Structures are given as structure tokens and as C-alpha cells.
Image: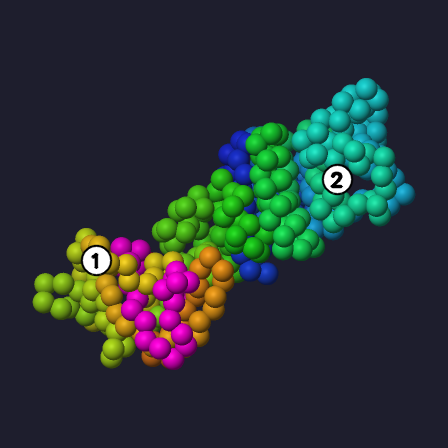
Amino acid sequence: MQGVDLDIRDREFIVLVGPSGCGKTTTLRMIAGLEEATSGEIYIDDQLVNDVAPKDRDIAMVFQNYALYPHMSVFQNMSFGLRLKRMPKDEIKKRVAEAARILDIGELLDRRPRQLSGGQRQRVAMGRAIVRHPKVFLFDEPLSNLDAKLRVQMRTEIKKVHQHVMTTTVYVTHDQVEAMTLADRVVVMNGGLIEQIGSPEEVYRAPRTRFVAGFIGSPTMNLLPCRLIANGSGLEVHLSEWLRLPVPPERRQRYQGRVGSELVFGLRPEHLTEGRGELSPGTAAFDAPLDVVEPMGMETMVYFIVDGTEVCARVNPAAAGKAGERMRLVADLNQMHLIDPKSDLVI
């Protein structure tokens, strides 16, 4: 870890996202007290907790591993922490019943974990955290062990739970789709550093670095080496001998000082589509020889090569050409990004 400065608002749903080894789980474990912070300070509710034991931090953690006791019923698993605190039985029943209602597992309270599906076990693990009424929920890649369909379903469940309970939540995942769908704010981490903090819309629309631009979005942003050249009173992005794209007029002032520079051009596949009638301002059409065509049902991905770099476009299935054919494509350059390859910062 190289230093993380992060202020999480009360009742906010924050998602730490990044590749393996970027420091997101270490950050979460330091908040929980399971990992010692070598420097810096951690506050929960304005209380310095660096030297406070994990059990006294009033946090609840949900892990990738459900960690349920196999010999206990769902009710016993959910109430275990409350029973350790010698809470009155009536209060325990009330809290478990409320959590079971929120998670829609009321009919499972008498079952053992072995009688549950993966999704049901994850709900029980969440219920065990909810009944404690903690100051902070910590989720460490809780959906990693579930299949794709169940992950989508559980994402919705977690979002619903937060809307019901409104407890400050810190959620760790390597899945950027999970991060975008769940978060109030996304914290994109890389190599022990925070690259960008912002709403899902902000990190998608206005990435600050090459890493964020390439990491957020599915499929990932097309990133191609280019040269910025002057063309009369305007500017062009020179991508290859056969592909030059005009810079929208409102971007000229921002990029003027980079004329002649070797840069990296970024454009998302969804901003590279089939031609649809007249061109709107800030767009440009060109013909590209298709290399690969991938039908996805409601959309089709088409790939072509620009000076050795593969480029992906997202098109209507009815408009998609076939591999080996040329296809008319339109680039929405109002959504383009230019990146300085030396600093990796978006200009």
C-alpha cells in the first residue's frame, strides 16, 4: 500500500474496485481492524480506531466465504452474535425476523446451511450482519463464489438491502460491472493507490487516467496510439494512413498545445456504431474492413484492425456486416479522450 486518503460519508455505499493486488482488500481489512495500519489514522464516526480491537469497532463483515456454522440452523447462525452479547430473547427474535423479512428468507430459519443454495447462504451471511445494527457494513467480494445469473440477482438484493437499512457500506470487488451498478461512489484502485473517486457516471464519462479509462466499461475502451495534427483551422487525430478523425471544435482549445505530439486516443465501443442517416455534430464516418464479428443477441460486436491494434465497435445486429467485408461506422468524437503516454493522464 502506498497511501490511501478516503473520506466516506454517513450512509454512503462505497465500492473499492481494481485488479488483484491493488490493495482494496487490505484497505477493507484495515478498516475492520484485521490488518494493522503501519501509518495514518482510521476514524469511524469521528472516533480514532487504530488501536481499537475489531470486536469493539461496531462493524459487520460479509466475506466471500459465507462462514456459516453447519450444525446451527439459519436462525441460530443469524442470532449467534446477539446471543454472545446476551441480548434479550425477544429483541433477538425481533431483529432476526426483520432481517429475514428484508432478505426474503423467513421460511428458511429452521434449515441448516447444507439445505440451502449458494444464494440463500449468502443471504443468511448478510442477515447475520444486518441483525447487529452496526455502524458500518464491510463486504469482501461476497458474490465471487456464485454463478453469473445468481450474481446479478444478488447484486439487486444487496442494493435493496442498502435502501432498506441505509448503513454506511464499504464493498470490495474486482468486477467493475458490480461496482458501477451498486455504488454511490466508486474508488478505483491500482498498485496501492487511488486512481480516481467519483460517481459511476463520473468515472465512466470522465476518467482521469489511462488505467481508469481502460478498466471501467465493458467491453473496455479502445486505446490506440495516435498523433494530433493541424488541418487548416481544425485538428485531426491521425490513427493510421487510412484513418484520420476530426476533433470537435469545442475540444480544439483544450488540445491545441499538443499538436504534433504522440498521444493515446480513447473511444468506447458504444461510441463507435453503424451509420444511421445524417451525421450529427462531432461525429465522423469511415469504412473499416471487419476482422471478427461477435453476435451477442441484442447487440453485435465487430472488430477491425488499425495499425496492428484491435478496435471494437458496438452495432445493431441488423446492420452488422460479415468478417472480411467493409462496414460503414460512425465515431462519436464528442466522447473521445486523449491521453498523455508519459504521465498516463487524460488531457
Q: Can residue 161 be spotted in the picture?
A: yes
- Among the 4 quarters of the image, the one containing residue 135: top right
Relative horizontal placement of residue 333, taking residue 312 as reference (left or right): left
Relative horizontal placement of residue 36, taking residue 312 as reference (left or right): right
Q: Which residues fall within the magenta stretch?
A: 309-336
Q: Quadrant of the C terminus?
A: bottom left
Residue type indicated by callout 1: Glu
Q: Position of residue 65 (x, y in %)?
A: 74, 51
The disc placed on residue 278 is: 1
Q: Can residue 314 be spotted in the picture?
A: no
Can residue 332 be found in the magenta stretch? yes
- Among the 4 quarters of the image, the one containing residue 276: bottom left
Residue type indicated by callout 2: Val
Can you tell which of label 1 and label 2 is closer to the viewer? 1
Residue at left offset 73%, top offset 31%: 100
* Separation of marks 1 and 2 at Cα, in angstroms: 55 Å
Residue at left offset 49%, top offset 52%: 188
Say which residue label 2 marks.
124
Q: Which secondary structure lies at badge 1?
A: loop
Residue at left offset 53%, top offset 31%: 10
Q: Which secondary structure lies at badge 2?
A: helix
Q: Quadrant of the N terminus?
A: bottom right
Q: Position of residue 335 (x, y in %)?
A: 31, 55
